[in-house]
């Protein structure tokens, strides 16, 4: 400021001095006036340049273009330009940091496994993440400022939004929901800020399916146990109340033993399944011989065949090349024996059952059980490995089936990286095969 005064005085003195030198006392005043006008003109020009630069700078900022070069102005205008440009740089940096934080925040919301929709005070969509677009069938750009209830039209959702009671969530059908492929969402609104709302959506299809499966499972187990229990308690009551003769007693006791055996088999299968689900996957360092597995299966199949029909079946076991499978012996045996005993149980007497182990050209190993039994209609095939799913309920019961055998086979196959293949033609027979990956096999000769 002092410099400015000093400069003004210099102008005044030089002007007045020049005027006095040129025209004595009159010249002193005129010279002084000319000097002041000159100084004012120069100062106004500098102020003009400063304001023009500032206007451009603010304009550039609002439309996001590059900033102009800073004008080189002397004196206080130079100082002002310098300070304002520093302030603008600082503000730019703060804006950039703010934008960066906002971008990061939105990226975090995008990464959320839940659908996120931000609503304004009128329930219009302000922003939504990718997951929400999938859940509700929204378009993140097109649907901005649309009323959410115009786009998500489920009556339960409309009623929920209208109720203004967001202490609980609401379940609605999601986008793409069809009877064959249900999509169920849980939607929860949370109020925030000035009447705004945050909508969170979660796909609960799998959870609901698991819950339905759990309910079915408990109902099935109860039913399976209740049947033999009812028979058992009936026999016990008879034995307690009637004076039976020895042959009748023995017959009753044999039937009771059969029912308790049935319950035991069921409990054993349930325990096997729960062990398969709860234990870590079998490692790759324990090797199980396919030949010993085949020998065990053959022994069991022959014993069962004789038991079911005195003339037995035509059983052919082809042990193939001696190989080892990396996995758990008890699991592999349980799966393979289930397939073999199923073939025996569902093939009429004298039918052919061919069990084989082969190593395929691509190095994979195939354990296959082919029978000439009743076969299975195509509509049953996709559901065969479901727990308690039976095509022929009475045959299954008669032969001591639990309805859990193929569920065990599926689990064991998955745990060993094997593929379970089922082919069947009604009235002609079936082929059940477990195909093991080459990585889990080794040829015994190579050891
Ligand atoms: P189950 O104990 O009833 O045999 P599984 O899970 O082993 O239960 O098999 C499910 C159903 O698949 C059986 O009830 C039967 O109807 C059918 N099934 C399994 N194996 C065969 C087969 N080899 N031939 C015909 N049907 C079969």
Image: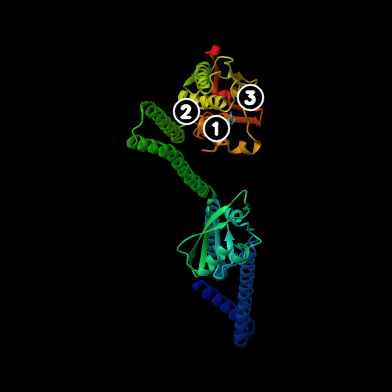
Label 3, ligand 1: CB separation under 8 Å: no
Q: Dot 1: few (<14), some (14–19), or many (≥20) neighbours within 10 Å? A: few
Tag 3: Cα neighbours inside 10 Å, few (<14), some, or many (≥20)? Answer: many
Q: Is residue 389 above or below residue 19?
A: above
Which circle's residue, 1 or 3, is located before the other in the chain?
3
Residue topped by disc 3: 372
Q: Secondary structure at mark 1?
A: helix
Q: Is mark 1 within 8 Å of ligand 1?
A: yes
Query: Is residue 289 at all visible to an observer of this figure?
Result: no
Question: Does label 2 or label 3 sit earlier along the sequence?
Answer: 2
Residue extending farthest to the top is: 445
Report how far apart the C-alphas of labels 1 and 3 lie in the structure: 16 Å
Instruction: Judge by depth and name the residue closer to the eye, 339 or 164.
Output: 339
**Above/below status of 252 relative to 84:** above
Tell us which disc is closer to us: 1 or 3: 1
Q: Quadrant of ligand 1?
A: top right
Q: What is the secondary structure assignment of the residue under circle 3?
A: loop
From the top left corner, tell me how far across and down residue 40 is, in percent.
61, 78
For mark 2, give the secondary structure. loop
Q: Quadrant of residue 48?
A: bottom right
Numbered circle sitting on residue 282: 2
Residue 312: x %, y % from top left: 55, 19
Instruction: Calculate the distance from the C-alpha at mark 2 to the C-alpha at mark 1.
Output: 34 Å
Q: Earlier in the sequence, mark 2 or mark 1?
A: 2
Q: Which residue is mark 1?
A: 395
Label at residue 409: none
| Marks 2 and 1 in Cβ contact (< 8 Å) | no
Q: Left or right: 164 with respect to 19? A: left
**Residue 203 x/y as whole percent:** 54, 52
Foreground: 287 or 154? Answer: 154
């Amino acid at each position: 400021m002092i410099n400015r005064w000093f400069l003004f005085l210099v102008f005044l003195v030089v002007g007045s001095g020049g005027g006095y030198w040129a025209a004595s006392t009159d010249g002193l005043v005129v010279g002084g006036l000319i000097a002041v006008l000159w100084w004012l003109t120069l100062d106004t020009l500098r102020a003009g340049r400063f304001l023009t630069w500032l206007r451009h700078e603010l304009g550039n900022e609002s439309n996001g273009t590059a900033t102009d070069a800073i004008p080189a102005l002397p004196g206080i205008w130079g100082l002002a330009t310098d300070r304002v440009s520093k302030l603008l740089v600082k503000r730019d940096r703060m804006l950039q940091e703010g934008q960066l934080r906002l971008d990061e925040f939105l990226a975090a919301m995008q990464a959320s496994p839940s659908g996120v929709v931000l609503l304004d005070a009128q329930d219009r969509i302000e922003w939504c993440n990718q997951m929400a677009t999938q859940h509700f069938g929204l378009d993140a750009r097109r649907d901005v400022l649309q009323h959410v209830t115009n786009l998500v039209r489920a009556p339960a959702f409309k009623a929920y939004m209208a109720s203004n009671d967001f202490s609980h969530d609401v379940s609605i059908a999601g986008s793409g929901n069809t009877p064959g492929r249900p999509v169920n969402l849980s939607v929860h609104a949370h109020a925030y800020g000035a009447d705004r709302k945050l909508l969170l959506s979660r796909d609960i299809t799998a959870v609901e399916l698991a819950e339905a499966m759990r309910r079915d499972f408990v109902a099935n187990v109860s039913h399976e146990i209740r049947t033999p229990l009812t028979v058992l308690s009936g026999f016990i009551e008879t034995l307690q109340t009637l004076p039976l003769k020895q042959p009748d007693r023995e017959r009753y006791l044999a039937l009771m033993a059969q029912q308790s055996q049935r319950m035991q088999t069921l409990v054993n299968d349930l325990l096997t399944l729960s062990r398969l689900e709860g234990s870590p996957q079998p490692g790759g360092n324990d090797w199980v011989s396919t030949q010993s597995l085949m020998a065990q299966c053959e022994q069991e199949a022959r014993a069962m065949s004789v038991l079911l029909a005195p003339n037995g079946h035509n059983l052919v076991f082809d042990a193939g090349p001696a190989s080892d499978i990396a996995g758990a012996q008890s699991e592999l045996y349980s799966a393979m024996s289930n397939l073999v005993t199923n073939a025996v149980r569902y093939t009429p007497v004298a039918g052919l059952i061919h069990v084989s182990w082969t190593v395929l050209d691509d190095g994979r190993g195939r354990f296959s059980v082919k029978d000439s039994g009743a076969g299975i209609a195509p509509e049953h095939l996709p559901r065969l490995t479901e727990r308690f799913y039976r095509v022929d309920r009475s045959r299954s019961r008669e032969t001591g089936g639990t309805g859990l055998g193929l569920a065990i086979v599926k689990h064991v196959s998955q745990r060993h990286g094997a593929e379970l293949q089922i082919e069947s033609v009604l009235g002609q027979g079936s082929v059940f095969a477990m195909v093991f990956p080459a990585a889990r096999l080794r040829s015994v000769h190579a050891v």
